[in-house]
Image: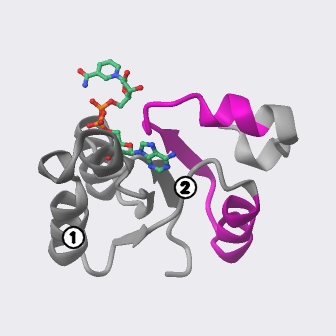
Amino acid sequence: MPGVATAIITGSGGLIGSASVEHFIAAGYRVVGVENDMRARFFGSEASTRDVSTELAMRHPDEFEWVELDIRDADGLMRLFDSRSGNRSGNTHGCPAFARLGRVGCPDRLRS
Ligand SMILES: NC(=O)c1ccc[n+]([C@@H]2O[C@H](COP(=O)([O-])OP(=O)(O)OC[C@H]3O[C@@H](n4cnc5c(N)ncnc54)[C@H](O)[C@@H]3O)[C@@H](O)[C@H]2O)c1
């Protein structure tokens, strides 16, 4: 959407991430969620956040997009950032992935 700022939220299906998605949508942002349901891999299917991600996408079809991507996939993240315009990001995925990105080289535009 031209003229609408984009917020990228990692861990967007999680407790903090999903609330952040709602917050930024209410504030007028278009939101891209980065979420790979790692929770299900850690804790089993009962801990999956897939339903939350699906529900967010259904509730906000024009404002929210869920990208199934591991935050540690630096190349994937670069492709995501290159393909979206935006000026904000939120990080709630529960692991120090941005620190890891820092070790492999984190461009200034990935820092918020
Ligand atoms: N819940 C709280 O009250 C609270 C309070 C303070 C700080 N925090 C911190 O906020 C962060 C998020 O907490 P939460 O309660 O929302 O956790 P959560 O487990 O509900 O959400 C984390 C989400 O990140 C996703 N995720 C994990 N690894 C990923 C990866 N590599 N790539 C993409 N997605 C990935 C998970 O699938 C999950 O949906 C944590 O660092 C937590 O320590 C939480």
Which residue is label 1 attached to? 54
Q: Nearer the viewer, mark 2 or mark 1?
A: 2
**Where's residue 55, x and y in %?**
15, 68
Colour convention: one colour
Residue drawn 24% across and 52% down?
A: 22
Residue drawn 72% across and 46% down?
A: 110
Residue drawn 51% across and 30% down?
A: 95
Number of marks: 2
**Where's residue 49, x and y in %?**
23, 53
Amino acid type, residue under disc 2 in the picture: Asp
Q: Is residue 91 above or below residue 73?
A: above
Label 2 secondary element: loop
Which portion, as a residue range, is magenta?
75-101
Graded by Cα atoms within 10 Å as few (under 14), some (14 to 19) or many (20 or more), the crowding at tag 2 reads: some
**Where's residue 47, x and y in %?**
18, 45
Residue drawn 62% across and 36% down?
A: 97
Q: Nearer the N terminus, badge 2 or badge 1?
A: 1
Residue 2 figure quarter: bottom right
**Where's residue 45, x and y in %?**
18, 54
Graded by Cα atoms within 10 Å as few (under 14), some (14 to 19) or many (20 or more), the crowding at tag 1 reads: few
Label 1 secondary element: helix
Q: Which mark is residue 28?
A: none
**1 or 89: which is nearer to us?**
89
Amino acid type, residue under disc 1 in the picture: Thr
Under 8 Å from ligand 1: the CB of mark 1? Answer: no
Q: Which mark is residue 70?
A: 2
Residue 80 figure quarter: bottom right
Q: Quadrant of the C terminus?
A: top right
Q: CA distance from mark 2 to mark 1?
A: 17 Å
**3 or 109: which is nearer to us?**
109
Under 8 Å from ligand 1: the CB of mark 2? Answer: yes
**23 or 52: which is nearer to us?**
52
